[in-house]
Amino acid sequence: MGAHRRDPEDRQRDGYAAAPDPARRAAQYRVDREVAHDLTEQQLSGQDDRAGAEPAEETAPPRHRMDDRARWMDTVVDQAIRRGEFDDLPLQGKPLPGIGGTHDPDWWLKSLVEREQISGVLPAAQLRAEHSALDETLDREHEERRVREIVGDFNARVIDARRQLTGGPPVVTPTRDVEREVSRWRQRRR
């Protein structure tokens, strides 16, 4: 039995204890375990033969068990850590969001709204409301330059909304002619 087992001095001399590669250590561990298991079976079957009984049937567990898979996963994670694949993760040193508190069945919807910065009003409805209130907004301004800026910004947002393919109702809000809106603004100021 001592010939097949490896004592700590043999392991250290062969590089087993100081081996930097976890996969090699795991493979050596499996080999050592299988050798010990085989020796134990040989001893048990030898005792049974001496007692006059038939050798015990092979009842070895399947080769790929959960502990082998867990050991393999530990090896893969250790190798990834050595390669630095877990360095500079976005939530490093911070608590994971959404853990703790009570269960919210709409957690995924709330995280989607937050992540995608979705507002509660669709762009088409928002632009229609602004279009109907644009004259009142322009009437509160005192400078022609500011009126031009507001109408230009409104037109840019209408054009952007038409180009977006986010779904929802179509944007049918018309753009406004800047010069025409400035002349209407002047007439209303008289």
Image: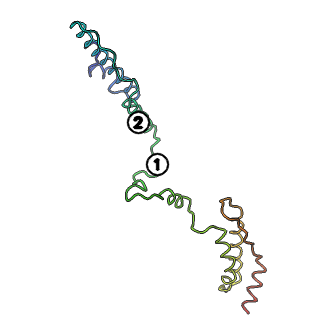
Give coordinates of residue 70: x percent, y percent: 38, 33
Type of amino acid under label 2: Asp
Which residue was labeled with disc 1? 89
| Cα distance between the residues tagged 2 and 1 | 16 Å
Instruction: Tell me the residue at 38%/28% (across/down).
Output: 65
Q: Quadrant of the N terminus?
A: top left
Residue denoted by label 2:
78
Quarter occupied by residue 186:
bottom right
Q: Amino acid at mark 1?
A: Leu
Can you name the residue that lies furthest to the front here?
A: 53
Q: Quadrant of residue 170?
A: bottom right
Task: Please give the name of the residue rendered at 67% of the width and 68% of the height, measured from the top-left corner.
Answer: 124
Percent position of residue 89, x then y = 46, 48
Residue at x 70% of width, y 69% of height? 158
How far from the left and from the top, in percent, is residue 18?
A: 34, 27
Query: Callout 1 environment at 10 Å: few (<14), some (14 to 19), or many (20+)?
Result: few
**Image spot of residue 166 (x, y percent):** 65, 59
- Tally of numbered tags: 2
Q: Residue furthest left?
A: 51
